[in-house]
Image: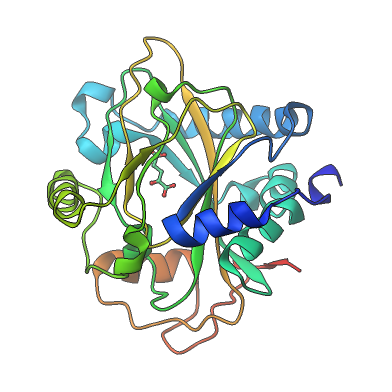
Amino acid sequence: MALDTPYALSSADIDAYQANGHTLLRGLALIDELAPYRDLIRVETNEAAKNYAPLAERGTYGKAFIQHCNLWVRDPHIAEFVLAKRFAKVAADLMGVDGVRLYHDQALFKEPGGGPTPWHQDQQYWPLDGVKCVTMWMPLVDVSADMGTMRFASGSQALGYLGPLDISDDSEAQLAQLVEERGYPVTPSPDMKAGDATFHDGWCIHGAPGNSSPDRMREVMTIIYFEDGAVITEPDSDSRRNDLASWLPGLKSGDLAASELNPSVWP
Ligand SMILES: O=C(O)CCC(=O)C(=O)O
């Protein structure tokens, strides 16, 4: 399959990821490779969007994006995209590990006029302390920076776990202050083409501005990977307990993180 051919990842890409906790890769998928999956992901996610209240009636989290998870389980064609070896190998090489498993995928569609994504750390949601984790964030359409491409506090992954702090006005306020106090440079992503992708470490503090386009949806697909061989840690928050039940079903702390929802995707 086309998306199983390797990407020419450079040592500079790996060094940037290791130093900053994030990196941008241009042309990870070509438009012809992406388009069939984009159409399927769009149909699925637009269907899920029907369950959302009008934008103005939602809170901060709800305004940030339409979120639709584990599409790979719903559609075998989307599974080809989510389980693609090209993406998984990049994830493994950036983290410097031999193999990776899938944690879950999620479509994140920021609507025209949608709000900012507050600063947060992804891994505070996951019962995987001490485990290398990375998220691939890929626009399915060309997106200009003012449609809400990601921004990162470069180097902040070195802080590790800062404690439970879900995406909210609180996480925005607390982490904005911390980023400022510690002097982490804030790196905005530039305009991106469909098929470009950013990768960020599970501990890297990040967020995104709102979508200021009057009529263009920021259609993004994300895939989360963790290093193969990871052991589940005791969840210390409701978010982590929920994640354990949702994305590592049937497992508990001390178990190998390898449920039927976490296939090995590389090698
Ligand atoms: O797409 C966004 O606005 C935020 C995405 C994000 O935080 C993530 O993928 O970890």
Rendered location of residue 119, percent (x, y): 26, 47
Q: Does residue 96 lie above or below 144 as drawn?
A: below
Which residue is rendered at x = 51% and y = 29% of the image? 219
Q: How is the protein colored in the picture? A: rainbow
Q: Does residue 14 lie above or below 172 as drawn?
A: below
Quadrant in the picture for residue 150: top left
Whether residue 163 appears in this view of the structure is: yes
Which residue, as the protein is rendered here, is positioned at the far right? 1
Quadrant in the picture for residue 34: top right
Q: Does residue 130 lie above or below 56 as drawn?
A: below
Q: Does residue 199 lie above or below 188 as drawn?
A: below
Left/right placement of residue 170 relative to residue 228 reads left
Quarter of the image that includes the C terminus:
bottom right
Rendered location of residue 209, percent (x, y): 31, 31
**Numbered circles on residues, count:** 0
Rendered location of residue 36, percent (x, y): 74, 30
Which residue is rendered at x = 59% and y = 82% of the image? 229
Left/right placement of residue 181 relative to residue 207 reads left
The residue nearer to you, when weighing 106 against 99, is 99
Which residue is rendered at x = 68% and y = 75% of the image? 98
Which residue is rendered at x = 46% and y = 26% of the image? 218
Whether residue 111 appears in this view of the structure is: no
Rendered location of residue 248, percent (x, y): 50, 71
Q: Ligand 1 shows up in which quadrant of the image?
A: top left
Left/right placement of residue 267 relative to residue 131 reads right
Which residue, as the protein is rendered here, is positioned at the far bottom? 254
